Image: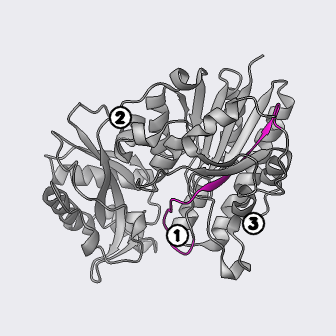
């Protein structure tokens, strides 16, 4: 009988010690009996998911956790999202992430990288209007604020573009695209302002007290990656479950089954139960599932400590616990690993590249003395500090 392997990833769960929490982290104060159980009954350590010199994005970090060395296979965030959206890239095409953002246009400050987590339906209307106003562009609507621009013939590939979630509350002028090929990108971004200013979607959002999407922000560009199938690397078939196109696109390129779950939103109200059910059902057909939950990261970007703690609690109670229960009833040999992809510290409201804790339990895995799941306990784990892309090998090898 084959071994069933599951990775449960709470995006951005790791953090720094916070004075308001008595010097503890959100992971240390959140109610997480199921992750704590995995740590107590299993093995763990710290994983460096972002290689030195690479940007600490969810793209690099999740690619690493999925078992791909980012130094070899990473080519940019947007091409991965293009794959999830069914947008085929030619050999010279460059894909850009196109955020709908909210900017204080008078003070020229980045207020909200997500335009108040605008709905996909509203975002699609805005992208359609931008496409009509700039017919020479190739714009594609995505999920919520996350949309796509495709440029021909390497246009803008070498430009220096800043992720908008890195500059929350900061002036935008020093962070607009710069360097080779950046001028047309800046022009597109600034030309979006008058198109969006009086759009019915934004006027309605303003009346409802919501933040309007009053500008686009281009970043995360790259060309289509060349990467082997997951089966070629690890010898098993698998599936990925996530609300966000980034993870779905990784799944497409990796040859994993991409499972869409109705009601999976990427924020605090996501369909946790639907994701769990999809995971356990998938294990009837494949031997590996990568289940990703975005909510802790979004709360970290928002700088909302209470909601980040709640996102971690919900991940533990509504994902980790039920998946463990399902595996224990399955009759299969199994192993489960839990971890964040990177820290998203509340104080910084963006990602950092520090190592993250991981813990795994299941068949043939003996406890190593960890007492709970946290950054501090991860440093005590028996696996020590490992490169993130080696986690799949650790999860699948014989450990005793």
Residue 242 or 225: which is nearer the viewer?
Answer: 225
Coordinates of residue 5 in the picture (x, y in percent): 70, 31
- Quadrant of the image containing the C terminus: top right
Q: Which residue is mark 1?
A: 302
Task: From the viewer's perspective, tell me whether residue 63 is left or right of residue 307.
Answer: left
Q: Of marks 3 and 1, which one's residue comes earlier in the chain? A: 3
Q: Residue at x 51, y 59 (%)?
A: 353
Residue 261 or 329: which is nearer the viewer?
Answer: 329
**Can the viewer see residue 287 in this picture?**
yes
Question: What segment carries the magenta color?
Answer: 346-365
State how far apart marks 3 and 1 are (Cα): 20 Å
Of badges 3 and 1, nearer the viewer stands: 3
Indicate which disc residue 28 carries.
Answer: 3
Of badges 1 and 2, nearer the viewer stands: 2
Q: Is the Cβ of the residue at disc 3 closer than 8 Å to that at disc 2? A: no
Q: Is residue 350 magenta?
A: yes
Indicate which disc residue 225 carries.
Answer: 2
* Mark 3 secondary-structure assignment: helix
Q: Residues within 10 Å of mark 3 (few under 14, many from 20)?
A: many
Q: Quadrant of residue 397?
A: top right
Q: Is residue 323 magenta?
A: no
* Mark 2 secondary-structure assignment: loop
Q: Residue at x 59, y 30 (%)?
A: 239
Coordinates of residue 132 in the picture (x, y in percent): 19, 50
Q: Of marks 1 and 2, which one's residue comes earlier in the chain? A: 2
State how far apart marks 3 and 2 are (Cα): 37 Å
- Quadrant of the image containing the N terminus: top right
* Mark 1 secondary-structure assignment: helix
Q: Is residue 21 above or below residue 300?
A: below
Q: Residue at x 68, y 30 (%)?
A: 396
Q: Residues within 10 Å of mark 1 (few under 14, many from 20)?
A: many
Indicate which disc residue 312 carries.
Answer: none
């Amino acid at each position: 009988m084959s071994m069933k392997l599951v990775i449960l990833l709470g995006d951005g769960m790791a953090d720094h010690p916070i004075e308001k929490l008595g010097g503890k982290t959100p992971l240390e104060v959140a109610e997480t009996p199921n992750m704590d159980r995995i740590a107590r009954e299993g093995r763990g350590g710290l994983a460096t998911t972002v290689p030195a010199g690479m940007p600490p994005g969810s793209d690099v970090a999740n690619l690493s956790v999925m078992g791909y060395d980012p130094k070899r296979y990473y080519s940019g965030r947007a091409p991965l999202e293009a794959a999830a959206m069914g947008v085929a890239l030619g050999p010279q095409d460059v894909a850009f992430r196109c955020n709908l953002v909210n900017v204080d246009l008078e003070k020229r400050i980045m207020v909200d990288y997500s335009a108040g987590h605008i709905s996909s339906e509203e975002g699609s209307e805005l992208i359609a209007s931008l496409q009509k106003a700039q017919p020479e562009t190739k714009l594609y609507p995505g999920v919520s604020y996350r949309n796509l621009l495709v440029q021909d013939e390497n246009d803008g590939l070498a430009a220096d573009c800043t992720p908008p979630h890195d500059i929350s509350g900061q002036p935008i002028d020093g962070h607009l695209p710069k360097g080779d090929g950046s001028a047309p990108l800046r022009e597109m971004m600034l030309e979006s302002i008058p198109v969006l200013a009086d759009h019915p979607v934004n006027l309605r959002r303003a009346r409802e007290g919501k933040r309007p999407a009053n500008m686009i922000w281009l970043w995360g560009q790259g060309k289509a990656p060349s990467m082997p199938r997951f089966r070629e690397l690890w010898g098993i078939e698998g599936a990925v479950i996530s609300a966000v196109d980034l993870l779905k696109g990784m799944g497409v390129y990796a040859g994993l089954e991409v499972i869409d779950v109705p009601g999976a939103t990427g924020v605090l109200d996501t369909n946790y139960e639907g994701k769990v059910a999809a995971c356990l059902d998938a294990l009837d057909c494949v031997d590996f599932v990568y289940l990703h939950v975005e909510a802790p990261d979004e709360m970290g970007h928002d700088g909302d400590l209470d909601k980040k703690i709640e996102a971690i609690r919900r991940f533990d109670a509504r994902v980790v616990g039920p998946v463990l229960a399902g595996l224990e009833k399955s009759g299969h040999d199994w192993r489960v690993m839990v971890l964040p992809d990177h820290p998203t510290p509340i104080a910084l409201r963006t990602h950092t590249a520090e190592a993250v804790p991981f813990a795994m339990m299941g068949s043939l895995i003996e406890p190593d003395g960890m007492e709970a799941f946290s950054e501090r306990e991860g440093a005590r784990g028996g696996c020590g500090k490992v490169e993130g892309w080696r986690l799949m090998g650790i999860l699948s090898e014989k450990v005793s």
